[in-house]
Amino acid sequence: MLLTPEQEQIGRDNFHEVVGVSRRDFMKTAAAAGTGLGALYFGYSKLEGKPVRTAFIGTGDEGNVLINEHPTDYMEIVAIADLRPANQKRTFTGSHPVARRGLNAVLGRAKADDVAKNVFTNHRDLLAKKDELGLEAVVIAVPLNQHAPIAIECLEAGLHVICEKLMAQNVTDCKRMIRAAEERDLMLAVGHQRHYSVLYDNAAHLTNEMELLGDIKFIRAQWHRNNSFPGSDAWQKWNSSAKEDRDLLTKMEQDGSLKEYGYETAKKLIDWRLYNSTGGGLMAELGSHQMDAASIFLGKKHPLAVQGYGGKNFFGMEGVGPESAWKDDRDIDDQIFVTFEFPGKTHEKNERDVAVVTYSSMNTNRWEPYGEAVFGSRGTLWMKTEKEALLYKESSKDSPGGVEQRIWMVNSKGSGPVLDSYETSAPSAAASGAQAGMGEKISRGYREEMEHFCYCVRTGKNELRCNGHVAMADAIMALTGNLAMKHKKRIEFKPEWFDASSDACPEEDEQVKTA
């Protein structure tokens, strides 16, 4: 969705206008609070008692983003574990001035030095010292194929768990994780951070509670990138990784010890997102976030069916692209296009009421920014790069719409709040209030999800917004999408797949086995 800067600004103002009017009192409270917006929006309070003593298992790119964002008044990092020496070091020194500043900067050198006394080369050595460390919880940010094994080991050791998304590499493992947590009355959260995004919370308020977009029949989600230029793929790290990492992991590969931790080769550990044995491809790494968002906008309903196309159409094909791409040995698809069918509002009474969600991800063109466009009968909502929400009205009999039309919200007799258009060149006071209520800088939700996790651990209230059951639904969407592309067929979702007490799962379903 390409718009002029002026049209984008109108969309932002429209979103703020409607949020400001529909949540006027709430926004005044949020603006007055100034800080602690997560607690205000998502229903947790300042932590009573000491911060939760937590270890980070996996301190690569995502792990260090979480370390950078960890809430020091809710969570105390007491130890880290990572197989790679360079990852261990940059946990303290940092590798990015904003996103991954390192513990020396986040905590100060004295506190960071205390953590440095407890650096482990693997999670098993860490778990052996859990009592000595007074450990209560872990944050797991390792390659996908090790999410379930490590999470279950930690749960069995009596620790609460936040695990990065995708929850697991298959649905059976998702159910094993849920059961391991519930049998021990432990918290299990999964890092689909849009559940803790103030921006998405306000957008969902408009689509679900206010129903201002009308009937949503189509959502278009995409995450397009261009990795066709040599050296441009951020997931391809082997050549740029530290020599000490490559040397150590290669030695472990040769002596067989690397397999003990779930990796066939050193390269597959470092470039884990590029291989089906260690990752889940574009659908798991990128699409899962956006299918999660689509589900939120449709009332957190489970999909009905999925079909699609996926292929390795660029990398590894001689004569296509530069020679470096010919020699690329990744086995995940580099272009995927899937179509999901979701139940509409009246689907239980009328099976024809279906909402369609499309998702595409590619590696050879990034013309449009990533995000989700929600198309309703009364308006269109565009969630742009998780940082902005733009709202536009559909033209109606009595008022115009479109990308250059400013809107406001009025109450219509018999039909509740509706959008109307008006002639002005500036946003109203309500729009300014909404913007102030969401904060100058939009949070992606990392800090808020960790705050709420620690709040739930300390209070014993399992109110996690992305618990194992919610995260398993996201995994089912992504993994079944992969199966539909692999077997080139339409697959219907079954209710028992979403039931953690049932052993049924899409990987073992007859739709797949007979494909």
Image: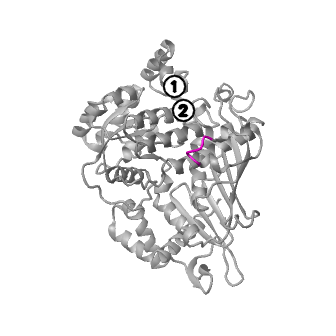
Query: Is residue 369 or residue 291 the one in the foreground?
Result: 291
Compared to residue 233, the image places residue 399 above or below, namely: below
Estimate the x, y position of residue 294 in percent, counting from the top left: 61, 57
- Where in the figure is residue 350, as x and y percent of width and height? 74, 66
Question: Would you say the residues marked 2 and 1 are in contact, meaning their CB atoms lie under 8 Å apart?
Answer: yes
The answer to which of 493 and 122 lies nearer the viewer is 493
**Image x and y of residue 280, in percent:** 60, 37
- Tag 2: amino acid: Asn
Q: Quadrant of the N terminus?
A: bottom right
Residue range in magenta is 499-503
Q: Under tag 2, what secondary structure? A: helix
Determine the residue positioned at 42% across, 52% down.
449
Q: What residue type is labelled 1?
A: Gly
Q: Name the residue under label 1.
A: 262
**428 up-or-down from 134: above or below:** below
Q: Earlier in the sequence, mark 2 or mark 1?
A: 2
The quadrant in which residue 214 appears is bottom right
In this view, which residue lies farthest toward the top?
A: 255
Query: Measured along the vertical axis of the image, is residue 515 above or below residue 423?
Result: above
Q: How is the image coloured?
A: one colour
Q: Which of 331 and 340 is in front in this view?
A: 340
Residue drawn at x 52%, y 27% as measured from the top left: 269
The alpha-carbon separation of the residues under discs 2 and 1 comes to 7 Å
**Would residue 44 be visible to someone looking at this image?**
yes
Q: In the image, is residue 173 part of the stretch drawn in magenta? A: no
* Residue 310 in view: no
Q: In this view, does 403 lie above or below 260?
A: below
* Quadrant in the rendering for residue 319: top right
**Prevalent SS, magenta region:** loop
Disc sitting over residue 145 in the figure: 2
